[in-house]
Amino acid sequence: MQLDPNEQSVREIYAWMVRLITPRPIAWVSTLSDDGVANLAPFSFFNGVGANPPTLLFCPANRRDGTPKDTLVNIQRTGQFVVNIVTDPDAEAMNTTSGEWDPSEDEFEIADLDKADSLCVKPPRVAVCKAAMECTLLEAIQLGTGPGGANVVIGRIVQIHVSDEMIGEDGQLDAQRMATIGRMGDADYVRTGDRFSMPRPRRSK
Amino acid sequence: MQLDPNEQSVREIYAWMVRLITPRPIAWVSTLSDDGVANLAPFSFFNGVGANPPTLLFCPANRRDGTPKDTLVNIQRTGQFVVNIVTDPDAEAMNTTSGEWDPSEDEFEIADLDKADSLCVKPPRVAVCKAAMECTLLEAIQLGTGPGGANVVIGRIVQIHVSDEMIGEDGQLDAQRMATIGRMGDADYVRTGDRFSMPRPRRSK
């Protein structure tokens, strides 16, 4: 079957995108408002950009009423955010923070999550998370307006935190211990236990 | 443990990023050179951007010698590309195309893959893929230069192809039949069979 995006509603095209682009990593983004109220929300249009400079990005869509989400507003005002990494034990708390809460409400409190100080930025980390990346805003690009309007937030990674227990005997991050979860379509998530390896081919024939 | 990215080499920081940001979806990107030579290569710094307008992005890093990859060169010259979706049966062929082949070589032929015509753009699709998104270039952003230098390619989705057999009885994409695979750190991949659901919370307290 073929689908012409111009003939689909924003809602329909979004549903196709989140079912086709899988599995997606989850950025659990913490920010602070001008007034110092903490905000915490998950985003699965998220990924690394590159290592030189160390950069990542995520894409907070506008709300259904066309206004930007609190996370984007906070980052544009303060220039700082933290990407907390979501693992299996934190799934339920993460999901709680995906609700549309009032800007005056602190999602850490709503989801009963402790805060941990960051080193280089003001927004707190989620204390229970196994890893987090502190970021400063490099660029925020507005690609669309109105409901579902697309935005791209590019951040420079200025500090990385990894829980010591997640490091294997080889000194590297152990994927089995980390047990990150990813996002699929609709209300579906995926665990990362069923892994396999494929070494890269020779560089040329 | 804490890591200051400024104290890490580009290679080390890249290794941390690909282990921390998981699972990542895979864009198997087909393009055409000026001369009409087809190129096909996988990228896992890839995701949707938003549905309004329908947009996605991927981030081709510069090669170790600091030059841009053929995929980026082709897109900048032609303004077109196709994102083919990678599923379990196509894993090995996808991996073959991740080698650094000469621009004069057609990775479809190297990996013994048939081409299928696209509807709105000139680069061919991977015939065997269960789904593909035809895209036109919206913006290519250069964030870094030299080895591992970061680039962001944002495309507008102009056509979507989905194999009829991947559609369930509800008329929607069936994740179990699709069996997409994702990227983990190092040479590791992940299957998407171990899924669970969490309905979104009420919109406010």
Image (cartoon, coloured by chain):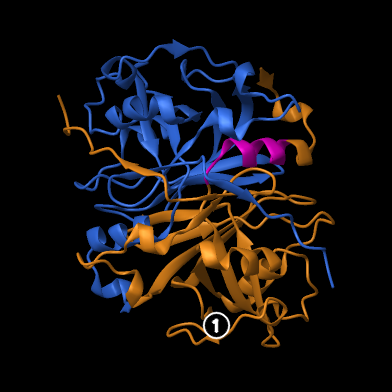
Chain colours: A blue, B orange
Q: Is residue B165 left or right of residue B171?
A: right
- In the rendered image, the quadrant that contains the N terminus of chain B is top right
Image position of A18 with respect to B160: above or below: above
**Residue B128 % position (x, y):** 51, 77
**Quadrant of the image occupied by residue B156:** bottom left
Q: In this view, does A93 lie to the left or right of A27?
A: left
**Residue B97 % position (x, y):** 69, 68
Label 1: how many Cα within 10 Å (few below 14, some 14–19, many 20+): many
Q: Is residue B18 magenta?
A: yes
**Residue B188 % position (x, y):** 64, 47
| Secondary structure found at label 1 | loop
Dot 1 amino acid type: Pro
Chain containing mark 1: B
Secondary structure mostly taken by the magenta-highlighted segment of the chain? helix
Residue shown at 69%/25% (left/top)?
A168
Bounds of the magenta segment: B13-23
Q: In this view, does A148 lie to the left or right of B110?
A: left
In the picture of the structure, the residue carrying the numbered disc 1 is B124
Q: In this view, does B29 lie to the left or right of B85?
A: right
